[in-house]
Amino acid sequence: MAYTQTNKPVVPTVCTLCANQHLTVTPTSVSFLSHFVSPASAKILPRHRSGLCALHQRKVANAIKRSRIMALMPFVK
């Protein structure tokens, strides 16, 4: 088990999309995709901040990029 510098065990996070199988990632679901974009700079959050697995992080990143091209989400804030 991994420990932090204060000797507290690190609790592994579970991917929210793996835990909820009924959630789907589509470029048109802007309210859902906005959870994975930083509010200040509109950048896509990295995996350790978003809490997603590698597969779902790629799917979310591609959906955000497609929704930006369709002008549903902004490129910059």
Image (cartoon, rainbow, N blue to C red):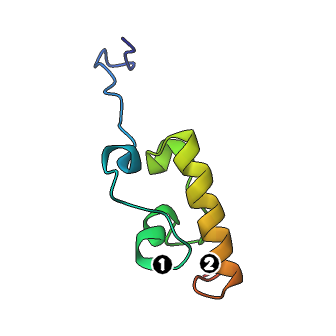
Residue 43 visible here: no
Alpha carbons under labels 1 and 2: distance apart: 8 Å
* Residue 3 as seen in the image, left or right of residue 33: left
- Whether 45 is drawn above or below 51: the answer is below
Q: Nearer the viewer, residue 35 or 29?
A: 29
Q: Quadrant of residue 67?
A: bottom right
- Whether 1 is drawn above or below 37: the answer is above
Task: Look at 28% across and 19% down and name the residue there.
Answer: 8
x, y percent for residue 47: 54, 45
Look at the numbered disc 1 and give the secondary structure of its residue.
helix
x, y percent for residue 23: 37, 60
* Residue 65 as seen in the image, left or right of residue 40: right
Residue 54 visible here: yes
What type is the residue that disc 2 sits on?
Answer: Ser
Q: Quadrant of residue 12?
A: top left
* Residue 17 as seen in the image, left or right of residue 45: left
- The residue tagged 1 is 30
Q: In terms of sequence position, does the residue under pointer 1 or pointer 2 come before the other?
A: 1
Residue 67, numbered circle: 2
x, y percent for residue 45: 55, 56
x, y percent for residue 30: 48, 78
* Figure quadrant of the N terminus: top left
Residue placed farthest to the front in the image?
A: 22
Task: Look at 40% across and 14% down and name the residue there.
Answer: 2
Task: Look at 65% across and 88% down and name the residue there.
Answer: 71
What type is the residue that disc 1 sits on?
Answer: Val
* Figure quadrant of the C terminus: bottom right
Q: Nearer the viewer, residue 36 or 67?
A: 67
- Whether 25 is drawn above or below 75: the answer is above
